[in-house]
Amino acid sequence: MFTGIIEDLGIVQAIQKSSHSAQLHISSPLILSDLKIGDSIAVNGICLTATTFDSSSFMVDVMPETLQKTNLGELKHGHKVNLERALTLSARLGGHLVSGHIDGTGRITKRINQDIAIVIEVQYPPTLGKYLVPKGSIAIDGTSLTVITVGSHTFSVSLIPHTRGLTTLGHKNIGDTVNLEADLIAKYLEKLVTHSKQNEPVPPSSPVSSGSSKDISLAFLAEKGFI
């Protein structure tokens, strides 16, 4: 589990590709400072496992599914990547809950200067539209950001100088691909609302008054204080 607060910009030192998978060698003094084999590291928002490391870089394996569904397949030697170590229970949750499991890729369609900020517009896949809410959270290349506006095909976020300087988003241009992960809570809430179990009626003691799990609705969740 991660927070979407990027800790370091790593640099791709080498890429070893096989027919369908790859191994990335990434340098980052911060990550290497306390790295252990088996540690989870979010690389551009993707939860990967450190398989080995040396004095200058750590290595992660990238399976075919990940190469197909994310922007890691576009990386080249010298490219920068967002890095975040796994969340500890004693850490502050400065962003939002990020699992490191990418829901799809988007494409930057606009960059607009607004005083100190830069607003970027991202085209998203249709499957993500239901999770996008103004003032809600989205992880872009692993960076926790607040959604400003949501359209039928695009959404926008604002980047302050700090975010631009410490993440890959400061180097992204129109047309570049970004990894997108929707808010984890939104996905669980959708499952709770839409999923209908085909089993026995709920016992009378259940808070669902009409006796069936399929009666859970947005109105019920609002009444109970969940939304």
Image: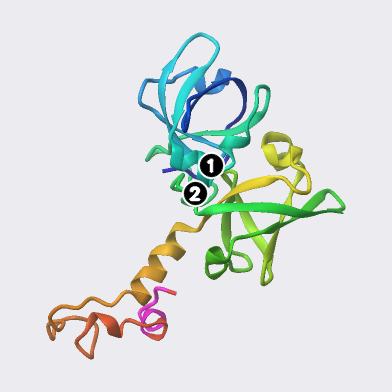
Under tag 2, what secondary structure? loop
| Residue 83, horizontal then vertical, whole percent | 56, 32
Q: Specify the quadrant that holds the N terminus.
A: top left
* Vertical arrangement, residue 108 with respect to residue 42, above or below: below
Magenta span contains residue 224 = yes
| Residue 207, horizontal then vertical, whole percent | 23, 82
Label whose residue precedes the other's in the sequence (2 or 1) = 1
Furthest residue in direction top, as rendered: 55
The magenta stretch is 220-226
Residue 71 visible: yes
Magenta span contains residue 38 = no
Asked which quadrant contains residue 222, the reply is bottom left
* Numbered disc in front, either 2 or 1: 2
Q: Which residue is mark 2?
A: 102
The type of residue carrying mark 1 is Gly
| Residue 217, horizontal then vertical, whole percent | 37, 83
Q: Nearer the viewer, residue 82 or 176?
A: 176
Q: With 129 as the anchor, is 100 left or right in this view? A: left
Q: Residue at x 66, y 29 (%)?
A: 80
Q: Are marks 2 and 1 in contact (CB under 8 Å)?
A: yes
Residue 91 visible: no
Q: CA distance from mark 2 to mark 1?
A: 7 Å
The type of residue carrying mark 2 is Ile
> Callout 1 environment at 10 Å: few (<14), some (14 to 19), or many (20+)?
many
* Vertical arrangement, residue 67 with respect to residue 96, above or below: above
**Residue 190 badge:** none
Q: Residue at x 39, y 28 (%)?
A: 39
* Vertical arrangement, residue 193 with respect to residue 137, above or below: below
Q: Which residue is mark 1?
A: 45
